[in-house]
């Protein structure tokens, strides 16, 4: 940008990016011209407004730079107007009732804060411009708009409290995100022979392999050469797009891997995360793999998550979730940490709702991934300090002598001392929080919007408290300590450092601490309509009630549709693949048994009888499921979701159980689907 733009234009754009200052429209013309020339010099023939609809996917509207003229000439055209605003036909994107199709118009608007890039494709290169996507009435139809709003509100709230805590020089505060992405690679020859993998992203059938992950020999083990070549290719493509990817190693499950980009400003990280998913998928095809981003592609094998590492900070105070080395930073740190504790306790259901998808339900609470109860893990040292604050008896980490939480007497905190807890859905990891419960196929925008917004709400609440108490003339240390004690009294129940997978925690969390266990998406999404969440988004201005409600509608519909698609597949595959295989086996076996009997050898008929009765049950159950999914007369969306969560899912599980048993009984050469062994171990 610096090389291509006039100095004052460059400065103006930087101002907008760094401090959120309004973009001067006259600047757009200069930027558009420079962008076009730059893109064309790199071989781009097209440009696209890239936006992020509620499907969680990435959408693009492509246009050519070249505009034919009536004279028969062509000129390359790309004005400031075209840069700033586009008008895709938005009618086919889900909007949850915000627009009727007759007013289908949606607008895309240039997001100056996210870098444009050139995407090289087989048929030419495209200048891609990240944009927001809004309706003609100004409502957000996408995931970026509320993310940008949440970034602005947390900036404002953080600024306010930082000034109250005595800072005079406070730069704009931004939230940061580094999202570790887990994924599976399956040889394309196998994956292409599995309709379930191709259409639903997970195996709906498949007997557990003799060897699973019992030996933990895959984790950090050697990466197969073919996978290494793939990873190298992915990283190179990402570097070209300006996305530095940090690590790639084997994950817990066989065939599972991880890629972690270096953290960036939340908005940019979110856009980049979408590109990472696209790049992982596309590059896999070039290497003869299929990349599975589904949260649970294989039953009985670890699922995939996306650990969203999140922090907030600025250029003057640094990372506000870093304990720092000096006492003043410490006081500040405890205040920000206290805000997180309050947020998790008050808005736990929101955190659960933003990670609720049909696919993530297979992971959450399934005794391997973080449970469906939201709590926050602080590490023993920090938890100890907060408990001391709660008891009104802060003695510091050394436990020697009572201390006042004052500027000069803060306990030293070391970020290195932070232990890890893999069973917590939301864990402090030394200088950031790690939202571990996010699903691998998800956009990170939803989780980031929730974290930023609840943080803003909590910081504002703390500021209100501090302001009202400061009036009585007490010093800031005493005041903050009193406010944090209040936070602990009201919200300390959200802090949990033990084993989140254990039965005891489920009982304690719900019965003693009053936390909510929200097992499925059908249970979680309705919280989006609760008064407290509505008030949170309305008061901060991140989502209007209409926008929030539309999100409930869209996500609920996606949930129902994805279960219906899976159910249809289960029934189809059971009837057209598995049942016929069982019948072939039965007829072959029956013939053999009869032939052998002719020469005086009597075989045991029990195995055949077993398969026969399983096959019959399978066929009947598949028919029942087929009928069950045609039911659509529900009183409410909630009711329909519950029906999918319990009835439909239950029927699918039963059919699978029968099919998987048959798989273990019949001849391998008659089995019509690639097996778990083949898919997981052949690389
Ligand atoms: P681990 O696997 O131990 O959790 P990694 O180093 O693999 O850790 O990944 C950590 C992720 O957290 C990376 O994407 C990294 O860029 C990101 N990260 C590091 N510091 C911060 C921070 N202050 N804020 C947000 N994300 C961060
Ligand atoms: Mg991690």
Image (spheres, rainbow, N blue to C red):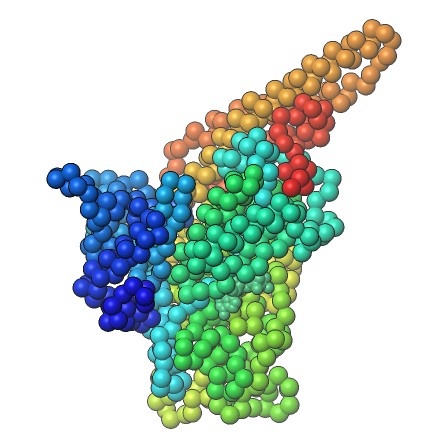
Image location (x, y in percent) of residue 432: 51, 69
In the rendered image, the residue lying farthest to the top is: 598
Which quadrant: the C terminus?
top right
Image location (x, y in percent) of residue 591: 74, 11
Which quadrant holds residue 509?
A: bottom right
Identify the residue shown where x is 34% and y is 89%.
471
**Residue 596 higher or lower than 516, as above or below:** above
Q: Is residue 411 left or right of residue 356?
A: right
Res. 292 visible in picture: yes
Q: Is residue 469 left or right of residue 660?
A: left
Identify the residue shown where x is 52% and y is 41%.
286
Which quadrant: the N terminus?
bottom left
Q: Nearer the viewer, residue 604 or 617?
A: 604
Image location (x, y in percent) of residue 611: 70, 23
Q: Nearer the viewer, residue 92 or 457?
A: 92
Identify the residue shown where x is 50% and y is 33%.
567
**Residue 303 higher or lower than 269, as above or below:** above
In the rendered image, the residue lying farthest to the right is: 600
Identify the residue shown where x is 35% and y is 74%.
172
Q: Is residue 524 left or right of residue 190?
A: left
Res. 519 visible in picture: no
Which quadrant holds residue 34?
A: bottom left
Q: Is residue 457 left or right of residue 213?
A: left
Image location (x, y in percent) of residue 375: 54, 64
Q: How many marks?
A: 0
């Amino acid at each position: 940008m610096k090389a291509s733009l006039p100095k004052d234009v460059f400065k103006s754009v930087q101002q907008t990016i760094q401090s959120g200052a309004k973009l001067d429209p006259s600047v757009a013309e200069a930027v558009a011209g420079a962008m076009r020339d730059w893109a064309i010099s790199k071989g781009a023939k097209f440009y696209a407004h890239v936006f992020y609809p509620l499907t969680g996917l990435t959408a693009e509207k492509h246009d050519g730079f070249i505009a034919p003229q009536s004279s028969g000439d062509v000129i390359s055209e790309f004005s400031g107007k075209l840069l700033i605003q586009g008008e895709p036909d938005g009618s086919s994107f889900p909007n949850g009732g915000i627009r009727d199709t007759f007013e289908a118009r949606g607008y895309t608007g240039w997001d100056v804060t996210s870098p444009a890039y050139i995407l090289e494709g087989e048929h030419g290169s495209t200048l891609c411009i990240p944009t927001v996507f809004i309706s003609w009435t100004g409502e957000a139809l996408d995931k970026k708009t509320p993310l940008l709003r949440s970034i602005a509100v947390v900036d404002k709230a953080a600024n306010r409290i930082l000034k109250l805590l005595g800072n005079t020089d406070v730069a704009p505060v931004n939230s940061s995100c580094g999202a570790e992405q887990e994924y599976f690679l399956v040889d394309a020859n196998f994956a292409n022979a599995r309709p379930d993998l191709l259409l639903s992203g997970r195996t709906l059938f498949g007997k557990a392999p003799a060897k699973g992950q019992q030996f933990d020999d895959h984790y950090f083990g050697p990466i197969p050469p073919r996978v290494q070549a793939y990873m190298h290719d992915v990283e190179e493509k990402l570097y070209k797009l300006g996305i530095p990817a940090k690590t790639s190693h084997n994950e817990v499950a066989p065939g599972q891997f991880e890629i972690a980009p270096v953290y960036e400003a939340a908005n940019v990280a979110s856009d980049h995360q979408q590109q990472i998913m696209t790049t992982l998928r596309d590059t896999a095809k070039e290497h003869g793999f299929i990349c599975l981003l589904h949260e649970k592609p294989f039953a009985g094998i670890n699922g995939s998550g996306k650990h969203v590492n999140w922090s907030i900070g600025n250029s003057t105070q640094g990372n506000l979730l870093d304990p720092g080395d000096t006492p003043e930073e410490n006081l500040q740190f405890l205040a920000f940490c206290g805000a997180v504790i309050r947020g998790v306790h008050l808005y736990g259901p929101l955190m659960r709702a933003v990670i609720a998808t049909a696919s993530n339900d297979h992971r959450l609470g399934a005794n391997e991934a973080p449970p469906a109860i939201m709590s926050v893990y602080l590490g023993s040292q920090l938890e100890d300090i907060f408990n001391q604050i709660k008891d009104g008896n802060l003695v510091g980490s050394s436990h020697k002598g009572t201390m006042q939480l004052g500027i000069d007497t803060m306990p030293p905190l070391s970020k290195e001392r932070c232990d890890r807890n893999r069973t917590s859905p939301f864990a402090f990891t030394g200088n950031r929080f790690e939202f571990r419960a996010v699903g691998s196929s998800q956009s990170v925008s939803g989780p980031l919007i929730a974290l930023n917004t609840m943080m803003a709400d909590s910081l504002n609440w703390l500021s209100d408290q501090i302001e009202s108490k400061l009036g009585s003339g007490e010093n800031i240390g005493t005041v903050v300590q009193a406010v944090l004690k209040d936070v602990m009294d009201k919200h300390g129940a959200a802090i949990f450092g033990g084993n989140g997978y254990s039965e005891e925690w489920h009982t304690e969390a719900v019965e003693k601490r009053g936390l909510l266990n929200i097992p499925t998406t059908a249970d979680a999404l309705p919280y989006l309509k609760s008064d407290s969440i509505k008030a949170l988004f309305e008061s901060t201005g991140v989502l209007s009630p209409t926008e929030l409600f539309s999100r409930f509608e869209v996500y609920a519909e996606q949930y129902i549709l994805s279960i219906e698609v899976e159910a249809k597949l289960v029934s189809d595959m059971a009837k057209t693949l598995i049942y016929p295989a069982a019948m072939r086996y039965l007829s072959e076996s029956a013939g053999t048994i009869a032939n052998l009997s002719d020469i005086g050898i009597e075989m045991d008929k029990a195995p055949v009888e077993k398969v026969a009765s399983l096959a019959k049950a399978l066929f009947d159950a598949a028919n029942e499921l087929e009928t069950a999914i045609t039911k659509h007369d529900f009183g409410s969306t909630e009711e329909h979701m519950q029906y999918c969560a319990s009835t439909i899912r239950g029927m699918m599980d039963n059919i699978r159980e029968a099919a998987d048993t048959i798989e273990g009984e019949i001849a391998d050469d008659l089995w019509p689907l690639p097996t778990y062994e083949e898919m997981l171990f052949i690389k």
